Image (cartoon, rainbow, N blue to C red):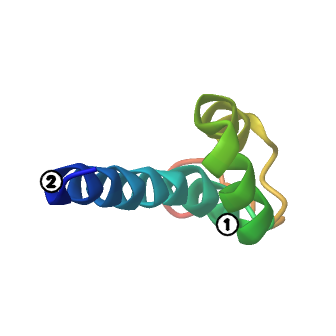
Amino acid sequence: MSDWGWAGIAVALVIWIAIAFWPARVARRKGHSWLLYFIFSLFFFPAALIVAYMVKDRRGLYVRRGGRGQ
């Protein structure tokens, strides 16, 4: 394989790993395991992204509803 072939593989690998961080970060913001979602997204990126956005937020935060002064 030529040098350009190896460079292309290296670039593709870096992009693949960089994209896998997206679902992991979403899951971490919701209180889930960053590492497990990262590994999940390395192999099944579309599914990991959907699951990360659909899982329940475990942080226990609540949104206060109401107008001013409440």
The quarter holding residue 62 reads bottom right
The residue located at (69%, 30%) in the rendering is 47
Label 2 packing within 10 angstroms: few (<14), some (14-19), many (20+) = few
Which amino acid, by three-letter code, is at mark 1? Arg
Give the quarter of the image for residue 50.
top right
Question: Label 1 belongs to which residue?
Answer: 28
Would you say 24 lies left or right of 6 here? right
Residue beneath the point at 17% across and 60% down: 3
Image point 22% across, 59% down: which residue?
7
Determine whether 60 is above or below 56 in the image.
below
- What amino acid does circle 2 point to? Trp
Q: Which mark is residue 4?
A: 2
Q: CA distance from mark 2 to mark 1?
A: 37 Å
The secondary element bearing badge 1 is classed as: helix
Q: Quadrant of the C terminus?
A: bottom right
Drawn side of residue 2 relative to residue 31, left or right = left
Q: Which mark is residue 8?
A: none
Measuring from the top left, give residue 11's x and y in whole percent: 27, 57
38 displayed left or right of 1? right
Instruction: Say which of 16 and 60 sits in front.
Output: 16
> 38 or 10, which lies in front?
10
Between 55 and 35, the residue placed more toward the observer is 35
**Compared to 45, does 41 lie above or below?**
below
